[in-house]
Image (cartoon, rainbow, N blue to C red):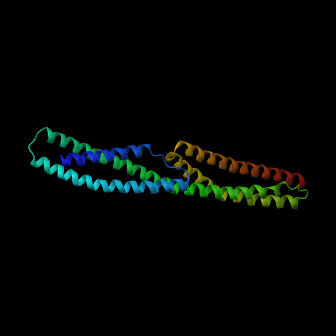
Amino acid sequence: MEVLSDIDDLLDWFREIEGQIRDAEKPSCEPDVVRVQLQEHKALNDEIASQKARVREVLATAKKVLREAAQGEDTATLREKAEDLKETMESVSKLSSDRLNALEQALPLAEHFFDTHVDLNQWMDAMEDEMGILDTPAIRPDQIMKLQDKTQAFIQSLNEHKPLVDKLNKTGGALVKLCNDDDAGKVEEIMHVDNERYNALRLSLRDKQQALEKALQVKSN
């Protein structure tokens, strides 16, 4: 009866924890939030590990009782509940481990994603400001050639920052798969806006380059 009581207590505990994990919010895309989620879940995971040790002790005692007791209705119930506890423990342990893995993956992805987004935006802000110089009217061929040099420097900077855009899209895509729907939408929106801005810069520079080449041809003829 004592072993049965211990098994029931543990079953109740594991079923409650199972409900908590299933109801838990998916990883956030915000580094500060996912950091707290990870901290809280690590504490819960440690608690599960501690209870698993208790389960092993109780199951060992149950095994001993089943070996020594006369077989009957009570032993059948004990065998059934012991099996139920073992399965529930393993199921909850896997559930907890899966959530821990998801949170451990989400944290560096969220950090890298927002760091990349900030770096990319600072560079694009500066580029958009500096590109105003290309609107300067150029009359003489030497002025046009100076603007061509500037345009080429901007294009080089654009190419150098392409890996940053790729990193944003790669980390963002991976983060979207782990996040809750609202946060996934937020990440997708950031990616969309940053990609649009980058592509707008690329097209603008291509147009400026072509316009300067035409202007130089006209002046040279």
Q: Residue at x 41, y 43 (%)?
A: 22
Q: Residue furthest top?
A: 73
Q: Residue at x 28, y 44 (%)?
A: 87
Would you say residue 221 is visible in this rendering? no
Q: Position of residue 10 (x, y in %)?
A: 28, 48
Q: Which residue is more in the foreground, 205 or 140?
A: 205
Which corner quadrant of the image does residue 112 belong to?
bottom right
Q: Which residue is more in the foreground, 55 or 123?
A: 55
Left or right of 88? Residue 180 is right
Left or right of 124? Residue 82 is left
Would you say residue 62 is visible in this rendering? yes
Q: Which residue is more in the foreground, 197 or 79?
A: 79
Q: Position of residue 81 (x, y in %)?
A: 22, 42
Q: Residue at x 40, y 49 (%)?
A: 98
Number of labels in the image equals 0
Q: Position of residue 145 (x, y in %)?
A: 83, 60
Decide: is 118 above or below 20: below
